[in-house]
Image: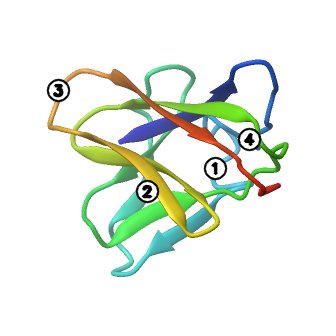
Amino acid sequence: MLLALFACTGHAAEIINPGFENDWQGWVEVDKDDKSVSLSGNSHKGTKAASISSQAGSFAQVVAVETNTDYVVSAWVMGTGIVGVKIGQQLVFERQGKTKKWKQVNVAFNSGEHQQ
């Protein structure tokens, strides 16, 4: 399961519906087998969280950023998961091993020449 939030140092980048309170609004849901991605009431904060049950599922959001700016994506993960950012062709990620409690995972990156 994953509850995603977005924070940064110095500049703000807006994630639409970061706590999934409005279901999948703002998110692109990839569910290759129609059973790997769902919403759950077992959340770190609020009433909902995104749940991924296999490698066939993921979700993402395109976010506007300022060029050459440092950011940190912060997400709360329970279970096993990967939190990542794709900037151009570069993928920056942090892998979370299996945990039975919510754990905050941070991924730092620089936007470089990109604006999203």
Q: Which residue is mark 3?
A: 100
Q: Position of residue 112 (x, y in %)?
A: 71, 50
- Residue at 39 percent of width and 77 percent of height: 34
- Residue at 76 percent of width and 44 percent of height: 16
Categorize mark 4 by other alpha carbons within 10 Å: few (<14), some (14-19), many (20+): some
- The answer to which of 20 and 108 lies nearer the viewer is 108
Q: Position of residue 12 (x, y in %)?
A: 81, 28
Q: Earlier in the sequence, mark 3 or mark 2?
A: 2
Q: Which residue is mark 2?
A: 38
Q: Amino acid at mark 4?
A: Ile
Q: Are marks 3 and 2 in contact (CB under 8 Å)?
A: no
Mark in front: 3 vs 2: 3
Q: Which residue is mark 1?
A: 23
Q: Amino acid at mark 2?
A: Ser
As drawn, 94 above or below 37:
above
Q: Which residue is mark 4?
A: 15
Q: Earlier in the sequence, mark 4 or mark 1?
A: 4
Q: Earlier in the sequence, mark 3 or mark 1?
A: 1
